[in-house]
DNA sequence: CGCTTAATTGAGAGCCTTCAATCATCGTGG
DNA sequence: CCACGATGATTGAAGGCTCTCAATTAAGCG
């Protein structure tokens, strides 16, 4: 993908700007394009925050907590804008799950320009809270939910992002490994595998090969994830009843995933 | 605190705006002031996102995962701006830890006005990523760290926010209960108490009464929290060595807390 | 000073992790 | 096209950390 194409994709899809407009040109002057092969990590200036536009492909944003332990903070797909923190409490990295094209901007200068243009500013003020709220939902999952609940929530979140409907079920082609799933929801690869096996044995999902999963019963999966189903102003009795409807293999949880900025 | 005073505090401290300026007036038209007594929850329109300015006091933003289980997503203090999600996967609540004054805005209209004013937009584009990055650091703690690491990280984060230096140590007057600490870092009240006891026995902290904690050895506390100390471009040997310097009562983790937008 | 509530401490159980082995998948080369 | 090898995934057994349940102690308030 040529620099021109990538940048036009950026201005158009991310902010609804016409190519060649003043803001677009100023932002373009800041942009640094990168092509990452599967498994490659973005080369960024880690001394200051960055804003990344994922033109196409898929990436993971990971925080390195220990030499051998990383927490994946979010997954991103084509069209997403990612806010990448500078080195702070943890060292972060942005890694391509598949071949990926991206645009990198230094955050301060990027926001300086964006703030001056109402259209761009409004777009960012829409995306940033969304990413924040997704991250919070993730924190809820990591802090309060069981392994099964986290995995079910993960699958549902991924379905919303990259799921394809096929008849009366849903197909999911995951670009990430079991390890990356585990690193995302705070579980070991073995636990992920075991819980996936439980969902399979319950007839809720059907893994096909290494990366494809067919979702046979989304309602049951949602019950597994244990989200708070529009609970406000619903009587406790009714709420309790609904929660108990999940089957025997179903126990506790809830979750969210993938936060474009 | 009168409406006028609260609002002026808002425009001045949060955005550096002069009272009576055009944006200020338009934002004021959206504002809904609330005074919360300790323990009171904000009355908000949960059908749409809200932006809250905490004029003075302290609040917790909590997600209700289950009837008896809540995850505190962030603590806020005077001057903070909070992005509060509408009802989604979870029901959120904003509760006062002490008597608190706040201003509530509907998010969409708020951002519409803010985007039109470069100064306000720039201020928000500075605060939102900060809150996002804090939330991510919290996710790392919840997903990867041990109980001791989480508590140490919590204390350090709180120290940065509301700690007072007193001689060669630091005093911390926590406005939240043990239960709220636990709900914030994903632990039970008993585990919080036990880990705090471990830090006390190690001579690192000295609890005084229910809410005050004296931090006697911040370096040791930092070691307990197990943050990645500017690890990029440092040899593995050196890194390993540093990590092993933490004492016997010290094991694994790292953390962050309190995200004003 | 006594009461109510919060915090601490202890014992046992459960869930996830760790360690280890087997199996499957997929890319490569014959 | 099939066989092979390497890597990833699954499954099993044992252990550890945190949770749950329960009792005791302390703090703060009237």
Image: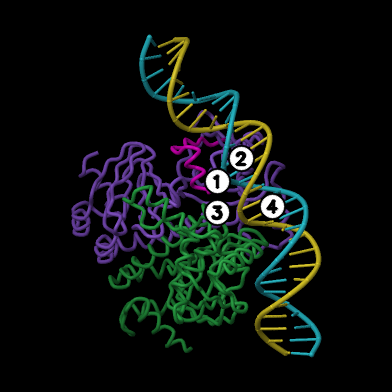
Chain colours: A purple, B green, C cyan, D yellow
| Mark found first going from the N terminus, 2 or 4 | 2
**Range shown magenta:** A169-187
Chain of the residue where label 2 is placed in the rendered structure: A
Q: How many marks?
A: 4
User: Are the numbered discs 1 and 2 placed on the same chain, yes or no?
Assistant: yes
Residue assigned mark 4 = A243
Tag 1 residue? A187
Query: Would you say the residues marked 1 and 2 are in contact, meaning their CB atoms lie under 8 Å apart?
Result: yes
Q: Camera-side residue: C6 or D30? A: C6
- Residues under numbered marks 4 and 1 in contact, where contact means CB atoms less than 8 Å apart: no
Image spot of residue D2 (x, y percent): 47, 10
Label 4, label 3: how far apart the Cα atoms are: 20 Å
The answer, for residue A225, to whether it is visible in the render is yes
Question: How would you rate the neighbour count of disc 4 (Cα within 10 Å): few for under 14, some for 14-19, many for 20 or more?
Answer: some
Label 4–label 3 contact, CB within 8 A: no
Q: Is residue A89 left or right of residue B117?
A: right
Task: Tell me how far mark 4 sits from mark 1, CA to CA.
Answer: 24 Å
Q: Please, which chain is the residue tagged with disc 1 on?
A: A
- Which residue is under mark 2? A195
Q: Quadrant of the N terminus of chain A?
A: top left
Q: Is residue D3 above or below residue B119?
A: above
Taking the magenta stretch, the answer to whether it contains residue A173 is: yes
Q: Residues within 10 Å of mark 1 (few under 14, many from 20)?
A: many
Q: Where residue A180 sits: x, y (%)? A: 47, 42
The CA distance from mark 3 to mark 1 is 9 Å
At numbered mark 2, what does the secondary structure look like: helix, strand or loop? helix
Q: Which mark is residue A142?
A: 3
The residues tagged by marks 1 and 2 sit, at their Cα atoms, a distance apart of 10 Å
Point out residue A226 in the picture as x, y percentages from the top left corner: 63, 51
User: Is tag 4's residue or tag 3's residue first in the polypeptide sequence?
Assistant: 3
Q: Is residue A227 visible?
A: no
């Amino acid at each position: 993908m040529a620099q021109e194409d990538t940048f036009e994709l950026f201005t158009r899809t991310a902010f609804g700007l016409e190519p060649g407009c003043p803001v677009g040109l100023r932002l373009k002057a800041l942009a640094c394009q990168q092509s990452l092969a599967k498994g490659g990590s973005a080369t960024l200036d880690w001394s200051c925050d960055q804003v990344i536009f994922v033109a196409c492909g898929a990436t993971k944003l990971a925080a390195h907590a220990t030499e051998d332990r990383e927490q994946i903070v979010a997954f991103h797909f084509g069209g997403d804008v990612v806010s990448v923190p500078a080195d702070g409490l943890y060292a972060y990295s942005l890694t391509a799950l598949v071949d990926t094209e991206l645009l990198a901007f230094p955050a301060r200068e990027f926001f300086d320009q964006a703030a001056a243009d109402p259209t761009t500013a409004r777009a960012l003020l829409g995306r940033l809270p969304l990413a924040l709220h997704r991250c919070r939902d993730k924190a809820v999952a990591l802090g309060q939910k069981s392994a099964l609940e986290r995995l079910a929530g993960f699958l549902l979140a991924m379905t919303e992002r990259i799921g394809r409907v096929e008849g009366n079920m849903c197909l999911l082609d995951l670009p990430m490994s079991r390890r990356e799933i585990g690193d995302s929801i705070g579980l070991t690869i073995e636990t992920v595998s075991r819980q996936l096996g439980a969902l399979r044995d319950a007839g809720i999902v059907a893994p096909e090969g290494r990366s494809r999963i067919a979702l046979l019963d989304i309602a049951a999966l949602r019950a597994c994830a244990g989200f708070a189903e529009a609970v406000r102003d619903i009587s406790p009795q009714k709420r309790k009843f609904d929660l108990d409807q999940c089957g025997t293999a179903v126990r506790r949880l809830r979750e969210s995933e993938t936060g474009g900025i």
